[in-house]
Amino acid sequence: MPPSGHRKRLASLALALAIALLLPLEAAGKSSAKASGRTPRPAPSASRPREAAPPRQASPALQKARAEIAAVKKSPARRRYRHNWEKAIASLERAARGPDTGPALLDAARARYALYRFSAVESDREAALRLAARASKAGAPQGASLAAAIRREAGDEPSPVAKAIRKVAPSPGAPPARRVDPPAVPVPTPTPPAPAAEEEESADPVLEEAMADAQPVPLPEKGPEPLAGGPAHVTEINSWTSPDYTRVAVYLSQPVSFEKQELPATADHPRRLALDLRPAVLDGPGRDRTVADTLLHRVRTAQHGPDTVRVVLELKGKDAYQVFTLGDPPRLIVDLGVEEARKEAVARALPRPPGEDEDAEAADRPIRRIIVDAGHGGHDTGAIGPRGVREKDVTLAMARKLATRLRASGFEVTLTRTDDRYLKLEERTAIANLARGDLFVSLHTNANPRRDRSGVETYFLNVTDDRYARRLAARENGTMDLEETSGDVTRILTDLNSKSSAGASRTLARLVQKEITARTRQAQGPVRDRGVKSALFYVLLGARMPAVLVETAFISNRAEEQRLANPAYQQLVADGVARAIVDFSGRSRVAAR
């Protein structure tokens, strides 16, 4: 045997002898420890888990900034104004120092995304993505998840299935795969997805976390339940009046319960409607507003106990009224003189009975006065597209063109706004009712988190379970997200349906949708017809005439944003709506010339 082999053999024998000697010693040590009741100490290991360190407390600056953004999200009055959001987000960014950098930037990204959901301003979403990237770089792992969720919602982030397909796809230089003959049994072709597949996707938990504390309060039967944190403040009371219609709006700092009671006329007092808001306090002393129209003598407000504000409307005659609540900002609406006026408006919109003298009927009740509402205005810009086109500018331009076109066709036209000014939604409806309009058309541009959404759609007033329609209505209503329907509003809608007003509005919506899509396709190429739908739009609620809301295109889509900014497209939309109104008036009543 060579010397090297001999040495290897001796080394192996020595190693075996050492192991044999050590094993008995280790066993003896274990038994000795067991006999003495001691637990043997484990050998040190690099994989031994360390005890989790307690979570580090945020700095006072970050705690204060978090409280500030939470207050904005929870307050219906504060979250309606951009400067409140900007101030709170700036506080979060200033708090991004040292160990708080990642968490503070993540909170700022979530707040900016919540603002985007409220504003539909594309630059807010881009800012949220930048903040999420900075948060991830600063050590907040949720930053990357938030950015991915925002991109997924926009349609920019590929789905897991698309990623898997991309992974298994052959590289350009790879040899072609071996051809496999198809099976003898035919495989059924999958059915292509229906257009409904474009409807709103299920909520992403990552994005819903960013929306926390900003969800609306459900509205129960007798008005909304009060929020925690003290009584509601009655901040303002407005009224709009005409000989046959009056609307009163009571504005609140937060949702509050209310009870209504009708008090009959006596020798000393007129018929009264009393509304008790609880818990609530007046901002300032009691008020006594004299209205002195044909329906309402005056409105009185007073502190009726430590936690109750009483609003009393002194009524004239026996006219019907409706009371309902709207949210964000919370307000209580009272409409007076609704019954006879609605019957007249619906009668004008119903088709003529067979054999009726068309000329005599037209002379009696023609459809001649059209109310055109340009959505948003003033500090309320509406949605803003990727290139900076503003909804409020587009809708005003379209409204002016539509008014010119309708007047040329012999109609009287009232514009709810003729310039860049802010109008409350309930004020727009009141303007339409005060003007005794025969039809009401509200013009808007659509917006959706998915950048590829496109097309035209027209709405009439009704409740809906469709998540997409409810989210759109929430944006146009100025609320943060999907809102429940109060019992009072449901009863109003049921009343409308029973009198065929909703049917007349649906007919008008179908005509508008048909004419706009036909004209724009002819001049602009492919335009998606998204159809006629229903939703609870505040601007249509309480209208005493057939009313529709038109989403003329998606300002969040780059190509359609460019169309909306083009005067030629604006004119096409105006011509389509005008043609639909002429057609509708011919089916119902002949327009006055």
Image (tube, rainbow, N blue to C red):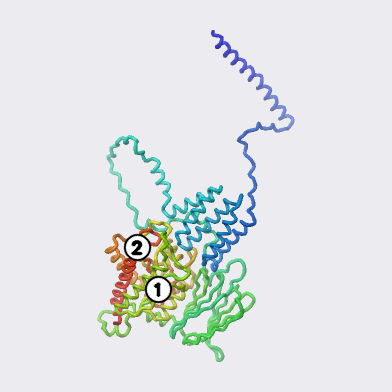
Q: Nearer the viewer, residue 85 or 549?
A: 85
Residue at the spot 28% in from the left edge and 64% down from the top edge: 523
With 47 as the anchor, is 520 left or right in this view?
A: left
Q: Nearer the viewer, residue 269 or 138?
A: 138
Residue sitting farthest toward the left? 355
Residue 88 figure quarter: bottom right
Q: Amino acid at mark 2?
A: Arg
Q: Amino acid at mark 1?
A: Asp
What residue is pinned by disc 1? 373
Of callouts 1 and 2, which one flags the residue occurring earlier in the amino acid sequence?
A: 1
Q: Mark 1 and mark 2 in contact? Answer it, CB < 8 Å.
A: no
* 465 lies above or below 279: above
With 414 as the anchor, is 112 left or right in this view?
A: right
For the C terminus, the image quarter is bottom left
* 292 lies above or below 99: below
Q: Position of residue 124 (x, y in %)?
A: 48, 59
Residue at the spot 63% in from the left edge and 33% down from the top edge: 45
Residue at the spot 34% in from the left edge and 80% down from the top edge: 412
Query: Residue 563's mark?
Result: 2
SS of the residue under disc 1 = strand
Q: Residues within 10 Å of mark 2 (few under 14, many from 20)?
A: some
* 35 lies above or below 514: above
Q: Position of residue 506 (x, y in %)?
A: 35, 70
Residue sitting farthest toward the bottom? 267
Q: Position of residue 87 (x, y in %)?
A: 56, 62
